[in-house]
Amino acid sequence: MMSGSGLGGELSPYMVFSASEWGELRASTPLDLSEADLERLRGINVELSLNEVVEIYLPLSRLLNLYVGASQELYRASDTFLGQLPGKVPYIVGVAGSVAVGKSTTARVLQALLDRWPNHPKVDLITTDGFLLPNRILEERGLENRKGFPESYDRRALLSFISDIKSGAPEVRAPVYSHLTYDVIPNQSVVVCQPDIVIVEGINVLQTGTASSAHPLFVSDFFDFSIYVDAEAQHIQNWYVQRFFTLRKTAFADPESYFHSFSKLSDAEAEATAVRIWTEINQKNLEENIEPTRERADLILQKGADHRVKTVKLRRL
């Protein structure tokens, strides 16, 4: 049913499952999502069917449900040992992957499925976009063309946010990002109030970089479980270009959109622009910062050209 070696026969810390093999691990987990629910959860140009939810995401929600339960028991045991009242510590799941690979859809589907388990009814989803530095600061630092790279985030604020959640703080606030204006919204925040599970989604959430003696911690140090959504770079480029074309007719058409000028491009100009942005920014970020973190994940979802998950790799305990 599973392979104990990596692809190509090399030793691997992962157990490797085909989509159908992974689907068998669903056991009797019921599907509580409808087609209407799924329509709201899908990302732009992301192909996702109820069959794939049953085969891939239901088993994953079952695994995480078991892990969350075991974690809660461990915290209770620790509190008993220390002679203190049980505290509520959220279970944190990180979801990483390239722009346009479908990680946001993965995060939303997992939130919807986990939210339906009776023993952890409150599941929050936070994206790291809100922790991007404001455009004016990026411009001051000459980073306007490196948005999404590790140095474009307020890493101290993001680390503080995750640390506060993991410490059981009753209320933690995260900044909000607007994809319409392509910037952080001033004086606006989302409040996280001791949920059972927090899903943190972002392209660089597994990235570490070089630890300094003053700040040796990374966001991923606070994750209880991490997921990397993977695909071949050429497939992701194709999806990025397709998404660009869709946005050109929808979000970019809004006069308030930061990218409104792109809505006036011809098909040829739009394709050339999308490929240029992908090659100069997103592909470079993928190769330099995102893809190198893949093997740090507890679980890797490997997609094929049709956006469907073909292989699941689960790290051995």
Image: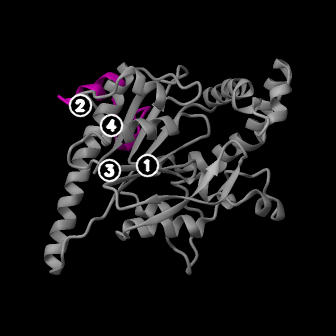
Q: Is residue 124 above or below residue 86?
A: above
Q: Is mark 4 on a helix, strand or loop?
A: helix
Q: Mark 3 points at which residue?
A: 122
- Disc 4 residue type? Leu
Q: How packed is label 4: few (under 14 Cα within 10 Å), some, or many (20 or more)? A: many
Q: Mark 1 points at which residue?
A: 297
Q: How packed is label 1: few (under 14 Cα within 10 Å), some, or many (20 or more)? A: many
Q: Name the residue under label 4.
A: 113
> Is 25 included in the stretch rendered in magenta?
yes
Q: Give the range drawn in magenta.
A: 7-29
Which mark's residue is nearer the viewer, 3 or 1? 3
The earlier-in-sequence mark between 4 and 2 is: 2
Mark 3 vs mark 4, CA separation in Å: 11 Å
| Figure quadrant of residue 195 | bottom left
Mark 4 vs mark 1, CA separation in Å: 21 Å
Q: Nearer the viewer, residue 294 or 10?
A: 294
Q: Indicate left or right for 1 with 269 as reference.
A: left
Q: Are marks 3 and 2 in contact (CB under 8 Å)?
A: no
Q: Which of 277 and 245 is in front in this view?
A: 245
Which mark's residue is nearer the viewer, 3 or 4? 3
Mark 2 vs mark 1, CA separation in Å: 20 Å
Q: Is mark 3 on a helix, strand or loop?
A: loop
Q: Residue 11 location in percent, x, y? A: 38, 42
- Disc 3 residue type? Lys
Q: Which of 56 and 305 is in front in this view?
A: 56
Which residue is depicted at the point 36% across and 25% down? 19
Which residue is depicted at the point 51% across and 22% down? 47
The earlier-in-sequence mark between 2 and 1 is: 2
Q: Is residue 205 above or below residue 85?
A: above
Q: Are marks 3 and 4 in contact (CB under 8 Å)?
A: no
- Disc 1 residue type? Ala
Q: How packed is label 3: few (under 14 Cα within 10 Å), some, or many (20 or more)? A: some
